[in-house]
Image (cartoon, helix red, strand yellow):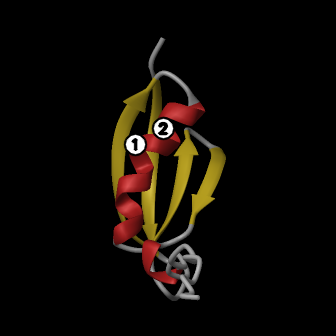
Amino acid sequence: MMQQYRAYLVGENGVFRSAEAFEAPSDSSALVFAKQFTRLGKVEVWQLGRKVAVLESEQSRPPLAEPSRPMLTRQ
């Protein structure tokens, strides 16, 4: 059974800037769908009156470190 969700884009001042209504079969599916909006900023995911999660903005995440490579030495 599909459930109704909303993904709210949260502005820097904490006010909702926009919302996207969608349906998903579960909370985990809803979070996967809503993750696409994090490129625009922080996102709150709600299912009716229940806050499911807050997803941080992609811009606020630190960049992934490159894997270290072993140094080659000549003998």
Q: Residue shown at 48%/21% (left/top)?
A: 25
Query: How far apart, in angstroms, are the residues tagged by discs 2 and 1?
Result: 5 Å
Task: Name the residue beneath numbered marker 2.
Answer: 30
Circle 2 packing at 10 Å, graded few (<14), some (14-19), many (20+), is many
**Residue 33's mark?**
1
- Total labels: the figure holds 2
Q: Position of residue 58 (x, y in %)?
A: 45, 72
Tell me which amino acid carries mark 2: Ala
Q: Residue furthest top?
A: 1
Q: Residue shown at 55%/38% (left/top)?
A: 48
Tell me which amino acid carries mark 1: Phe
Say if mark 2 contacts mark 1, CB within 8 Å. Answer: yes
Nearest the eye: 7 or 60: 60
Q: Position of residue 44 (x, y in %)?
A: 54, 59
Q: Is residue 7 left or right of residue 73?
A: left
Q: Residue shown at 42%/65% (left/top)?
A: 38
- State the quadrant of the C terminus: bottom right
Q: Is residue 73 left or right of residue 20?
A: right
Q: Position of residue 3 (x, y in %)?
A: 48, 24
Q: Residue shown at 55%/69% (left/top)?
A: 56
Task: Tell me the SS state at disc 2.
Answer: helix
The answer to whether residue 31 is above or below residue 72 is: above
The answer to whether residue 22 is above or below residue 62 is: above
Q: Is residue 37 left or right of residue 62?
A: left
Task: Tell me the SS state at disc 1.
Answer: helix
The answer to whether residue 69 is above or below residue 48 is: below
